[in-house]
Amino acid sequence: MESDHESPQLALVRESVLLGRKWRAAVDERLRPHGLTLARSTVLYWIDQLPGKVTQRELADTVGIEGPTLVRLLHALEAQGLVERVPMPGDRRAKGLRLTDAAQPVLATLKSVIETLSQERLDQLDRRRLASATRLVREARAAFD
């Protein structure tokens, strides 16, 4: 529902939010048969992507969630045997996070699901326009850093 009085900036935010909601719902639907959720999978993905052992604070900042929410997700992932807490070099109090070997097949499933879904739903988009839109959204996101 677009308004004649809506600024282009707000239109971009609205469409980004709506796309994000649809993406989350579609991914969750595809992950459910594998016993996964997008929330847990996102945490696994970022632990895998961030270099070395990552702290809870770094991970929460990257994922964009509050500490208590991350703690609940981490407890569930630890109970599944997918994540472990390990000492951080140089700081006896800090604990880093790393994936266990059991997380690798889960990550492979996640990557397959999101690649398949993106191909099914987004392959018809013009590659040049898609690259331009990606740059634009990245710039908009950076404006909030």
Image (spheres, helix red, strand yellow):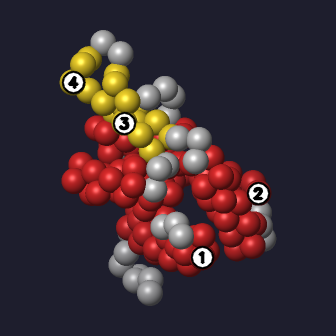
Residue drawn at (77%, 63%) of the image = 126
Q: Quadrant of the N terminus?
A: bottom left
Reading the chain from its start, which is encountered first: label 1 or label 3? 1
**Distance (Cα) linking label 3 and label 2:** 40 Å
Q: Nearer the viewer, mark 3 or mark 2?
A: 3
Report which residue position mark 4 lands on: 93
Report which residue position mark 3 lands on: 85
Report which residue position mark 1 lands on: 33
Q: Quadrant of the C terminus?
A: top left
Q: Which mark is residue 127?
A: 2
Q: Nearer the viewer, mark 2 or mark 4?
A: 4
Tag 3–tag 2 contact (CB < 8 Å): no
Name the kind of residue labelled 3 in the image: Arg
Q: Quadrant of residue 111?
A: bottom right
Above or below, 56 against 116 in this view is above
Above or below, 37 against 93 in this view is below
Pick whichever, 127 or 28, lies toward us: 28
Reading the chain from its start, which is encountered first: label 2 or label 4? 4
Name the kind of residue labelled 4 in the image: Arg
**Distance (Cα) linking label 1 and label 4:** 38 Å
Name the kind of residue labelled 2 in the image: Arg
**Distance (Cα) linking label 1 and label 3:** 28 Å
Name the kind of residue labelled 1 in the image: Pro
Residue drawn at (28%, 51%) of the image = 71
Which residue lies most toward the bottom here?
A: 1
- Is 118 situated left or right of 84 in this image? right
Residue drawn at (49%, 26%) of the image = 52
Question: SS class of the residue under badge 4?
Answer: strand
**Distance (Cα) linking label 2 and label 1:** 31 Å
Pick whichever, 143 or 89, lies toward us: 89
